Amino acid sequence: MNFAVIKNLRIVASSIHQLNFKMEIPKLKITFLFKHMSKTSKHFATRAIHQAYNPLDHHGALTPPMHISSTYAFENVEQGGAAFEGDNDRFIYARLGSPSQQLLEKRMASLEHAEAALATASGMGAITSAIWSFLKPGDELIADLSLYGCTFSFFEHGLKPMGIEVTYVNLSNTEALTQAISEKTKLVYSETPSNPNMRLVDIEALAHIAHQHDAKLMIDNTYCTPYLQQPITLGADLVVHSATKYLGGHGDLIAGFVLGAQEDIDHIRMFGLKDMTGAVISGFDVSLLLRGLKTLHVRMDRHCKNAQKVAEYLSQSPHVKNCFFPGLSDFAQQALAQKQMKAPGAMIAIELHATREQSAAFVNAMQMILCAVSLGDAETLIQHPASMTHSTYSEEELLAHLISPNLIRLSVGLEHVDDIIADLDQAFSSVFGDKGLAISA
Ligand SMILES: Cc1ncc(COP(=O)(O)O)c(C=O)c1O
């Protein structure tokens, strides 16, 4: 590994002082020294809009410049050589970062209360870059039973053939981790809530157990975003995101993040990303994400409000066997949700009193709601995991990973909630032939 470049990276990171930004770890104390902001800690919404950028340093431009240059010029060989040695703070090549990417990373790190962030070309780019950086043949990764389909495929087809052991454990049961973990376990991995079936894990309890065994806890925080849940403040070592979802928020980009301690993020940038995955975010997507983050809190509030009403409607339907949503009083893990999430989010999973075919027919019967994978967009999206996102699972794997054939996943969007409910209602009527339940919300 090129330690000179790592040294350089640390200096580049420290050049954030040029932006008059200072972040103190431990986690919750963040100080701003911008000319146009007071010296007090600012709220999430304010940091999402202002963090690490002063328009007055950029001709007054409120929108930060978009850097799309792939390479960076030096005055001479000596200056270039010093950059590689880490003796100045020049940018070198876009695979290592750019000024606008650095701004995005500082802003996102502030929102997650992480020491550092790395923006990547996709959520899978974040997950693969991070995991390749820490595991070697003979190591073990313990993962929760429920995972996004491509994460599961990566574990099965990327890690296992390389001699890395992957053990799936029901991490909702903390005791199960205590039983399974051993000295070869280097990483514990979970989503919470999980995709697609909305199971939660207790981040604080898992972190405690992982740390007793010198393992890292990595949490996929895609469903919550840092607005609803901040795993690092609960003890997680690494957080990953598909920024394609709520962080971008408009379905017009693919991107990801890894967040954690500066040392870990430097290692992922210089090893997993630079040398292994090359999953570098484009300058255009950096700009779109900076824009998306500015409205994250407003969008999330409305997503959550809509989802609460949709979940209450669904839970009353005679065709719904189970409605999994942390905001419902009968949600099995409601106490945990209240402990670690600011609000229940906007993802809902339902199991219908129906066959696999009828469940697919219900999805097909939507008129406004779109049948699509992905989530976190303004549009309400519905999909049938057994046929779509998790279709690579065998029947046995679906069973083992708690994905029933009649499970349907809903990403509640920003349309008027009455129209979302009306569409679900007409779909129930169309498939099951009875009168709908729709209530004016
Ligand atoms: C929970 C979760 N993690 C990771 C990913 C992968 O993200 P991306 O599609 O941005 O690569 C997804 C994608 O749907 C996801 O839902």
Image: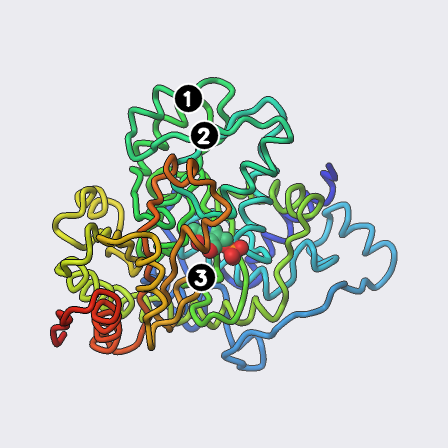
Residue depicted at x 67% and y 41%: 271
Q: Which residue is mark 2?
A: 142
Amino acid type at mark 2 = Ile
Q: Position of residue 25 (x, y in %)?
A: 42, 44
Q: How many marks?
A: 3
Q: Looking at this rendering, what residue extends furthest in the bottom direction?
A: 60
Amino acid type at mark 1 = Ile
Q: Is label 3 within 8 A of ligand 1 (CB to nearest ligand atom)?
A: yes
For the residue pair 440 and 270, the one nearer the viewer reads as 440
Q: Are marks 3 and 1 in contact (CB under 8 Å)?
A: no
For the residue pair 396 and 124, the one nearer the viewer reads as 396
In this rendering, would 47 be left or right of 56? left
Name the quarter where the C terminus is drawn.
bottom left
Question: Considering the numbered disc 3 on the image, is that residue within a helix, a strand or a loop?
Answer: loop
Whole-number angstrom distance, CA of label 3 to CA of label 1: 32 Å
Depicted 42 relative to depicted 87: above or below: below
Q: Residues within 10 Å of mark 3 (few under 14, many from 20)?
A: some
In the image, which disc is placed on residue 374? 3
Name the quarter where the N terminus is drawn.
top right
Q: Which residue is mark 1?
A: 181
Question: Considering the numbered disc 1 on the image, is that residue within a helix, a strand or a loop?
Answer: loop
Amino acid type at mark 3 = Ser
Q: Which numbered disc, 3 or 1, marks the residue that appears first in the sequence?
A: 1
Depicted 123 relative to depicted 172: above or below: below
- Residue 22 seen: no
Residue depicted at x 58% and y 44%: 128
